[in-house]
Amino acid sequence: MKNILKNTIVAGLLISATALPNMLHAQNNALVSLSGSLAGNAGGSDFTGFPYNSTYNCLLANQGPTTIPANVLRIHLIVPPAFEFVSPYVGLPSGWTYEIENAQSAFLVNMTDPLETIGIADPANPTGFVEFSVPIRTIASTPQVTFIWNVERTVNAGFMNWSVPFQNPGNAGYGYTTVGTTPLSISFRNFTANADAGCQVKLSWNVSSERNTEKYVVERGTNGTAFTAIAEVKKLNNEDENAYTFVDQKPLNAHNFYRIRQVGTDMKAGVTKVEQVKMNCLEDRIAIYPNPATDVVYVKGITDKGKIRIYNLVGQLVIEKDVENTQEAVSLASLVQGAYQLQVFAGDKSVFHTKLVKK
């Protein structure tokens, strides 16, 4: 979704400009853009029925040359009466708050983190973008109606002299959605995901109605928006409320987003809310010693072949060593005294990093 929305923004959708003082109160131009969509289960932003847990996805970008300070702007999202916003918002970006004004109106407020200008020095982690997947639910059927997104100024006395795109038609956007008339055939009672001491994740869910249910599909993703099926669980066929569990024995060593999708014999589907679990198992096993070090530093607990890399404080690679064993000795003879960053890579993925001091 992020790449699609970024391409849309770059193409010029919903871009507006206004004068925005920087932190020294000099005048600069700000370009703020916002795009939105609903994650429908019938294609695009449309839904087959209700109740259905989904997300309102939007992407905010600061395309101007000026960093926008915290607590200056907010995003206002509005859904039609056939939908409602729900909480909690798992995976809410750092520095932002999620506020439900009423069932059909919610705000995302930039409270603590300034929004930098767009930078693509690292294409995998560009700056200037904030992506949101706000939890929503269909609660009734509806013919085609609109959902709305808008950028607004916050009411914060400490920043009354600041301006952002506000009450400007270029900032407001809308899309169309429909919700089918047939109620979905399952009622999820709850869904939880918890990590255990063995670096596994246990998923549990309860259902009170399994009419036309064939099976359950366990889905996992890395961002709360895109998911991949990792397992299937058969229906129990009990008459009363049914309880299910599944253990993900190989979770990602990062943020794991889970949901359960019900697959029906009537070709309809229901889905749970999204639960998030962050794993640091590889990092917990890897360690270095001694630190500070004089001539040699040892890296232990390595489970995959890869590389050990040491960078100086300006990001220059100063040492690189291939990983062949579970413990590796790295000579520091070529380094001057000072602080460095040591990283362990499995393939092209960083699985461990820490500060290293050469004395």
Image (spheres, rainbow, N blue to C red):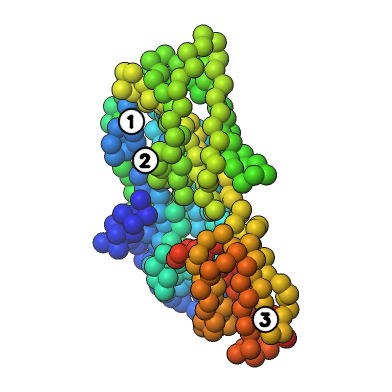
Locate residue 191 relative to residue 9 in the image: left or right.
Answer: right
Disc 2 element: strand
Determine crowd level at label 1: few under 14, some 14-19, many 20+ residues with C-alpha closer than 10 A: many
Marker disc for residue 38: 2
First of labels 3, 1 by sequence position: 1
| The C terminus - image quarter | bottom right
**Labels 3 and 2: the sequence-earlier one:** 2
Q: Earlier in the sequence, mark 1 or mark 2?
A: 2
Task: Check disc 1 and report its element: helix, strand or loop.
Answer: strand
Foreground pick, 19 / 4: 4
Q: Nearer the viewer, residue 339 or 246?
A: 246
Q: Residue at x 63, y 76 (%)?
A: 329
Q: Which mark is residue 296?
A: 3
Amino acid residing under circle 3: Val
Of 73 and 206, the residue lying toward us: 206
* Residue that protrudes farthest toward the front in the picture: 325
Proximity of marks 1 and 2: CB atoms separated by less than 8 Å: yes
In terms of secondary structure, where does tag 3 sit? strand
Residue 346 falls left or right of residue 270: right
Quarter residue 327 falls in: bottom right
Q: Quadrant of residue 311?
A: bottom right
In three-dimensional space, the C-alpha distance between marks 3 and 1, rounded to whole angstroms, equals: 60 Å
Q: Which percent across, then down, holds residue 294?
A: 72, 84
Which residue in the structure is indicated by mark 1?
Answer: 47
Q: In the image, which disc is placed on residue 37?
A: none
Residue occupying image coordinates x 53% and y 77%: 321
Q: Is residue 341 left or right of residue 129?
A: right
Q: CA gap, disc 1 to disc 2?
A: 9 Å
Q: Is 334 rendered above or below residue 81?
A: below
Residue at x 45% of width, y 64% of height: 347
